[in-house]
Amino acid sequence: MPRYILMTRLAPSALHDAEARRKAGRRWLDRVQEKCPEVKWAAHYAVLGPYDFMDIYDAPDAETAQKVSLLSRAEGAVAAESWQALPYEQYMKALEDIAT
């Protein structure tokens, strides 16, 4: 399955109550698992920089990845950006294919 990376930013007001943040995160994950059961999670990180969180997951297609992003926005993310990630060796194979 293709791998996707979801970067999300929350509203500052969502960061004042740790217990409420934990519940909101659980609610988001429950909704994603309900609506997109085929998604397989690889990692979830809080990050420094312009985003608050990075989620790494596998999804069968871009439509499913879009649903994950939409659910993030519906559950309170003020920004969500999704990227498809290609393993380095697959990247190198693609490069070799066009370089010859």
Image: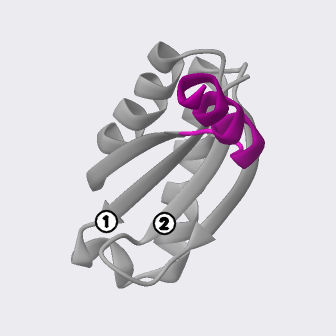
What secondary structure is marked by label 1?
strand
Residue 86 among magenta residues: yes
Q: Check the image and report above or below for 52 versus 93.
A: below
State the separation of the CA atoms marked 2 and 1: 9 Å
Point out residue 1 in the picture as x, y percentages from the top left corner: 74, 22
Front-most of 34 and 80? 80
Q: Check the image and report above or below for 32 versus 49.
A: above
**Residue type pointed to by label 2:** Phe
Question: How has the structure been colored for display?
Answer: one colour
User: Which residue is at 66% across, 27% downward?
Assistant: 2
Residue 31 among magenta residues: no
Front-most of 72 and 14? 72
What secondary structure is marked by label 2?
strand
Point out residue 17 in the picture as x, y percentages from the top left corner: 42, 81
- Dot 2 corresponds to which residue? 53
**Residue type pointed to by label 1:** Leu
Q: Check the image and report above or below for 82 versus 34.
A: below
Residue bounds of the magenta highlight: 85-100
Q: Earlier in the sequence, mark 2 or mark 1?
A: 1
Point out residue 29 in the picture as x, y percentages from the top left corner: 61, 43
- Dot 1 corresponds to which residue? 10
100 horizontally vs 13: left or right: right
